[in-house]
Amino acid sequence: MKVILVPVTPFQQNCSIVICEATKRAAIVDPGGDIERIIAEVERQGVTVEKILLTHGHLDHCGGAKALADHYGINIEGPHREDAFWIDQLPAQSQRFGFADAQAFTPERWLDDGDSVQFGDETMEVHFCPGHTPGHVVFFSRKHKLAFVGDVLFAGSIGRTDFPRGNHADLIRSIREKLWPLGEDVTFVPGHGPASTFGDERRSNPFVGDEVAA
Ligand SMILES: [Zn+2]
Ligand SMILES: [Zn+2]
């Protein structure tokens, strides 16, 4: 599995082109916008895009999802149904933040804890991790020890919880009870900023590290 990061939108969101190297088929995680740049990178890699995967309903993560799905004629999977209210607000949010027009949509498949998603010969587990938004999911490749965590966890930080229906206690619980058990040696790609590992965050994250009181 190969991952190409394409930072998109004024928020520099890490859109990921995740490629199954055996089949040259790919999934695109969180195409928040700038879809011409995503399409150009897909062409450069010479891969076939099979589906779009969404971690949560925020504009910078799914603002380009509908346009990209229409461009390739592919399905959108995720996030969890609890984020539908965010997706419904995409057109208003994109105006408010001065983004290119973002279209609302209904994913072909809502995801829940314990589901899995496939592309090419690859499978990723779906872990429900509410807190930043109530319908946030994380994608995890057990085979490659790699997780796409959206805005749940960052290198040295955690997701904001001051948005409507954000919940700090839920977020901390999601990280400690859902992410940490996946293993200290798991590398994660966050929605913003550099990648890290769960082990490094357990040791040094000032918000949710093991030294921080529960
Ligand atoms: Zn977010
Ligand atoms: Zn974000």
Image: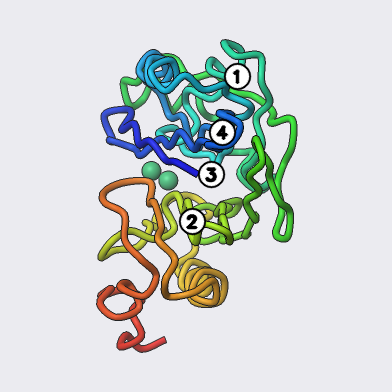
Badge 4 density bin: few <14, some 14–19, many ≥20, Cα 10 Å? many
- Name the residue at 39% across, 70% down: 198
What residue is pinned by disc 1? 69
Mark whose residue sits in front, 2 or 1: 2
Query: Residue 207 lies in what quarter of the image?
Result: bottom left
Which is more N-terminal, label 4 or label 2? 4
Which is more N-terminal, label 1 or label 2? 1
- Name the residue at 53% across, 44% down: 56
Disc marking residue 27: 4
Element type at mark 1: helix
Which is more N-terminal, label 3 or label 2? 3
Q: Are marks 2 and 3 in contact (CB under 8 Å)?
A: no
Q: Which of the two residues, 160 or 45, is positioned nearer the viewer here?
A: 45
Mark whose residue sits in front, 1 or 4: 4
**How far is disc 1 from disc 4 in space, using C-alphas?**
11 Å
What residue is pinned by disc 2? 147
**How far is disc 2 from disc 4 in space, using C-alphas?**
14 Å
**How far is disc 2 from disc 3 in space, using C-alphas?**
15 Å
Q: Is mark 3 within 8 Å of ligand 1?
A: yes
Q: From what the image shows, is residue 160 above or below residue 205?
A: above
Q: Are marks 1 and 4 in contact (CB under 8 Å)?
A: no
* Relative image position of residue 49 (x, y in whole percent): 57, 24
Mark whose residue sits in front, 1 or 3: 1
Among all residues in the image, which is located at the extreme front?
22
Which is more N-terminal, label 3 or label 1? 3
Badge 2 density bin: few <14, some 14–19, many ≥20, Cα 10 Å? many
* Relative image position of residue 199 (x, y in whole percent): 36, 75
Which is more N-terminal, label 4 or label 3? 4
What residue is pinned by disc 3? 56
Which is more N-terminal, label 4 or label 1? 4
* Relative image position of residue 195 (x, y in whole percent): 31, 54
**How far is disc 1 from disc 3 in space, using C-alphas?**
16 Å
